[in-house]
């Protein structure tokens, strides 16, 4: 997505919303891989889930990632010095939309938590590099039973004991928490300074150090975990970044996902809407296709309009990242509207499919449960509204942003 100089062609529009040739080539290659290598596994995934079996195993996921690596897709956001592609945010957004087209819980390999790049040399060898290669699985743990949207209310304690730290407390709703062999844990080391005042620190904590995970059953497939820390001893060398930097690192981790989540949702919405169009053109009732009914037409029209609006909010948020501008405002708008859009689209698509949409023979029912989470994790709808309104009310930004 490019913005043309207003002086280059004074008689033409100053904005060019077309993708570059490179962006289109990368997107089309990703689309081809998803269509040829990943989507053929969907029926087996649905069959396993109907039989209450695990969906994609870790070995199967790694095999798909290995195939993708041969296509050139490895480490979308990973710096080139670590063997990654280090793609611009707009290009990453386009690829995540392609990933969203499949119901498999697939992602390209070669990635690590963005805050792991704050690791020192020893930590890079022990944690960062093995994570990029897929030999280790990490999870990020900041959310607690009493600190979800209010992340500044975390209580897990980190107490010094000689050169070590002793962690006590609980984290909850942790993605990958059941599979991870190490966690990035944010704990309170100085209550008097407070969470926002430099009183928290991030630690790299191996499962072997003594924490345990407890599976949380949810309405979606798979599930997050609670992590329990009871006098877990962590060596001082396992502090990530600096002592007192924990909350800052946590906000960096959370912020990245706010344009990635709706990017993924765009792919779900695109495929689901196409399924609804195909079904409406072939499903007949009362002697004619249901596509001739105005009720169906309006659902399709509303879905396409909202999908296109969300697309530009998402791409604008990603473009803002690429410009080096603070992306929080645009990313909050993208996540707020994008998450709501995908929920409304999937609901309409299920309605258009009628009873079949409610069965587990098609992916629609699965999407219906899956996308509800998008309005909650990594910043609820309510938190996005708070951020957006606060930015405007306090004058941090202006209506219309850079075009306002």
Image (cartoon, rainbow, N blue to C red):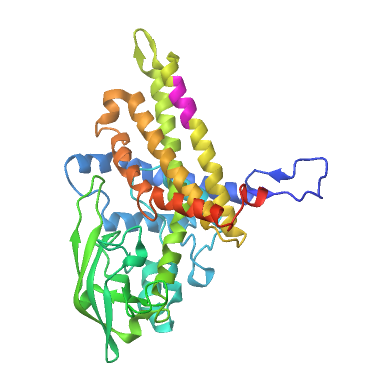
Residue at left 32%, top 55%?
61
* Main secondary structure type of the part rendered in magenta: helix
In the rendered image, the residue lying farthest to the bottom is: 162
Residue at left 24%, top 53%?
223
Queried whether the magenta region covers residue 293, the answer comes back as no
In the rendered image, the residue lying farthest to the front is: 393
Question: Is 404 placed left or right of 375 in the picture?
Answer: right
Number of callouts: 0
Question: Is 213 placed left or right of 34 in the picture?
Answer: left
Picture coordinates of residue 380 (x, y %)?
38, 51
* 371 is higher (above) or lower (below) than 198: above
**Whether residue 111 can be seen here:** no
Which of these two is toward me, 95 or 257?
257
Picture coordinates of residue 87 (x, y %)?
54, 59
Residue at left 59%, top 50%?
23
* Range shown magenta: 297-303
**Whether residue 77 can be seen here:** yes
Picture coordinates of residue 231 (x, y %)?
19, 79
Q: Quadrant of residue 66?
A: bottom left
Picture coordinates of residue 336 (x, y %)?
45, 46
Residue at left 36%, top 7%?
287
* 340 is higher (above) or lower (below) than 84: above
Question: Is 347 placed left or right of 396 in the picture?
Answer: left
């Amino acid at each position: 997505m490019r913005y043309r100089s207003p002086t280059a062609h004074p008689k033409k529009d100053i904005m060019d919303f077309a993708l570059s040739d490179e962006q289109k080539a990368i997107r089309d290659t990703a689309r081809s891989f998803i269509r040829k290598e990943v989507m053929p596994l969907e029926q087996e995934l649905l069959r396993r889930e109907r039989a209450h079996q695990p969906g994609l195993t870790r070995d199967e996921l790694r095999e798909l990632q290995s195939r993708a690596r041969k296509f050139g897709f490895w480490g979308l956001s990973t710096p080139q010095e670590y063997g990654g592609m280090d793609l611009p945010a707009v290009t990453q957004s386009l690829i995540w939309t392609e990933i969203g087209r499949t119901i498999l819980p697939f992602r390209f390999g070669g990635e690590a938590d963005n805050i792991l790049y704050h690791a020192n040399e020893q930590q890079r060898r022990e944690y960062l590099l093995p994570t990029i290669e897929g030999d280790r699985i990490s999870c990020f743990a900041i959310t607690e039973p009493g600190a979800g949207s209010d992340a500044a209310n975390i209580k897990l304690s980190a107490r010094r004991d000689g050169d070590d730290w002793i962690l006590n407390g609980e984290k909850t709703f942790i993605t990958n928490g059941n599979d991870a062999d190490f966690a990035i844990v944010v704990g309170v080391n100085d209550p008097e300074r407070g969470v926002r005042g430099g009183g928290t620190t991030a630690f790299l904590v191996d499962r072997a150090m003594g924490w345990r995970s407890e599976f949380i059953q949810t309405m979606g497939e798979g599930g997050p975990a609670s992590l329990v820390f009871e006098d877990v001893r962590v060596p001082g060398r396992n502090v990530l970044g600096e002592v007192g930097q924990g909350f800052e690192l946590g906000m960096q981790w959370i912020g990245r996902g706010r344009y990635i989540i709706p990017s993924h949702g765009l792919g779900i919405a695109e495929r689901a809407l196409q399924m609804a169009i195909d079904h409406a053109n072939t499903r007949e009732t009362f002697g004619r296709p249901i596509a001739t009914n105005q009720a169906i037409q309006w659902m399709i029209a509303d879905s396409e309009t909202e999908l296109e609006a969300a697309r530009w909010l998402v791409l604008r948020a990603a473009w803002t990242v690429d410009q080096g501008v603070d992306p929080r405002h645009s990313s909050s708008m993208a996540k707020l509207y994008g998450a709501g859009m995908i929920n409304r689209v999937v609901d309409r698509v299920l309605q258009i499919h009628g009873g079949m949409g409610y069965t587990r023979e098609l992916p629609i029912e699965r999407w219906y449960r899956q996308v509800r989470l998008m309005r909650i994790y990594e910043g609820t709808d309510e938190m996005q509204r708070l951020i957006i309104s606060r930015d405007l009310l306090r004058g941090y930004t202006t209506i219309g942003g850079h075009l306002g």
